[in-house]
Image: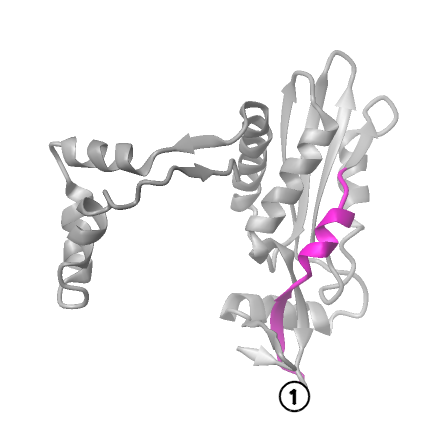
Amino acid sequence: KNFHGHSYTPLTPAQLGIWQHETQRQAGLTYLVQGEIQGRGKLHHSRLSDAWRRYLRIQPALRMVIRTDAQGAPYQNPFLESMIEKISITYYDGSMTSIPEARHLEVKKIQSLNTGPLIHLAVVEYPHDKWCLLLSLHHILADGWCTHIILNDVFSLYHRHAIGPLQFEIEEYRRWLQKQASKPWLDFWRHQLEGKASGLLNHALFNVHDLTAQSSIESL
């Protein structure tokens, strides 16, 4: 949808309920969730920051802020990608700031649904390369189950940065597909597309030999 020339997304029923509850409160936000993972090993700050910003670019749903239209109806609107470069990870010295203290400090950063960002990443660092990665976000973006998924995804990007982009040859992939003895995925999509796109699936899967250029899949 569009409002004043900008694209936006209506809130889901669950999000609308959260928004109504938060806007009726006189002070502070309550629907805040946090997740963390702890580990050991050298943590490269620049690589982690790069992975975090890349993740926000490919996950616009996590960049949402909540605005209202002329009638006062709420809608989701992602903040501009240009703002991503201004988002930094907070690093805490574990000898001075405990994990509970860091949790408290991070959750206080989320103060308004209409300004954002509604998601923050922090690291509590300890001697001997021990660390705790702490994610804080508003529940209107995602629930608590998602925090570890997000953290694992960010770490996947962090590690991919070390090995660089993956090279993918589409012709090689086509040959691999044809050699598979079992093709349950093909039956699934034939059923899904039945009567909607006759012959399209076979063409897409088995007639891609004209695409000879090598594709470079960025490590997201």
| The one of 195 and 173 positioned closer to us in this rendering | 173
For disc 1, the neighbor class at 10 Å (few under 14, some 14 to 19, many from 20) is: few
Give coordinates of residue 71: x percent, y percent.
65, 88
Question: Element under label 1?
Answer: loop
* Residue with the most extreme right position: 96
| The one of 83 and 216 positioned closer to us in this rendering | 216
Give coordinates of residue 111: x percent, y percent.
78, 59
* Residue with the most extreme bottom position: 71
Residue positioned 74% across, 48% down in the render: 85
State the image quarter where residue 23 is shown. Answer: bottom right
Give coordinates of residue 214: x percent, y percent.
38, 37
Relative to residue 79, is residue 50 depicted above or below?
above
Q: Look at the image and give the residue range highlighted in magenta.
A: 72-89
Residue positioned 56% across, 34% down in the render: 157
Give coordinates of residue 131: x percent, y percent.
71, 23
* Residue with the most extreme left position: 181
Residue positioned 65% across, 40% down in the render: 52
Whether residue 87 is in magenta: the answer is: yes
| The one of 188 and 166 positioned closer to us in this rendering | 166
Residue positioned 21% across, 47% down in the render: 205
Q: Which residue is mark 1?
A: 71
State the image quarter where residue 112 is shown. Answer: bottom right
Total tally of numbered discs in the picture: 1
Whether residue 141 is in magenta: the answer is: no
Amino acid type indicated by mark 1:
Gln
Which coloring applies here?
one colour
State the image quarter where residue 47 is shown. Answer: top right
Relative to residue 142, is residue 10 depicted above or below?
below
